[in-house]
Amino acid sequence: MQKIPGVYALGINVIPGNYRIGAISEYHISGNYFYVGSAINGLYQRVCRHLNKNKKKHWHIDYLNFDVRIIVAARTENHQKESEICNYIKSDYIKNFGSTDTGNKSHLFYCSINEVENAFKMAGLKFYVIDPDCGSLSLALKKMQ
């Protein structure tokens, strides 16, 4: 699969629990969230990595036990779009989650898909809503080319 650069938001259901997130803190997290990320070196590869349950913990999102419900993705080579999207989401969030490299308040938001879609639109991105199955992801990303 060709490496398509872009940004994404994973609609996730976090299994209730106390989570130690890297060096930032321990949080009790449960429920439905959206996690915003970028994958300038390949959307397909990055999202499939997030879907894999057996992976080395590298990013904050890797420390959560979750199921992916939906994916919103857009093609872009501008990694700043990730921060723009986060800035447009005004809902509750887990402070500093996933944002140590961007300076955003967070990358994990307790919000609706409508708010995520609006944030992508405000960032000027044409986005796709995708089923979290990697086969569907592959087909959707081919449409982005």
Image (cartoon, helix red, strand yellow):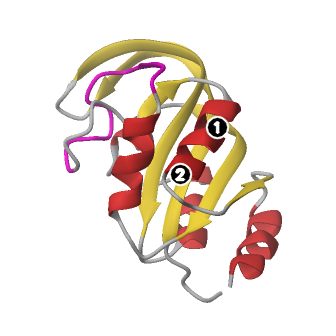
Q: Position of residue 51 (x, y in %)?
A: 62, 52
Would you say 137 lies left or right of 35 here?
right
Neighbor class of circle 2 (other Cα within 10 Å; few <14, some 14-19, many 20+) is: few
Q: Residue 91: within the magenta? A: yes
Instruction: Report which residue position mark 2 lands on.
Output: 54
Q: Residue at x 55, y 14 (%)?
A: 30
Placement of the C terminus among the 4 image quadrants = bottom right
Q: Spatial distance from mark 2 to mark 1, Cα to Cα?
A: 19 Å
Q: Nearer the viewer, residue 73 or 120?
A: 120
- Quadrant of res 13: top right
Quick check: is 21 in the magenta stretch?
A: no
Q: Where is residue 54 in the image (x, y as percent from the top left)?
A: 53, 51
Q: Name the residue under label 1.
A: 11
In the rendered image, is residue 121 in sight? yes
Q: Which amino acid does label 2 sit on?
A: Asn
Q: Name the mark on residue 37.
A: none
Which residue: 68% across, 49% down? Answer: 71
Tell me the mark number nearer the camera, choosing from 2 and 1: 1
Query: Image height check: is 53 above or below 73?
Result: above
Res. 56 in view: no
State which region is magenta. 90-101
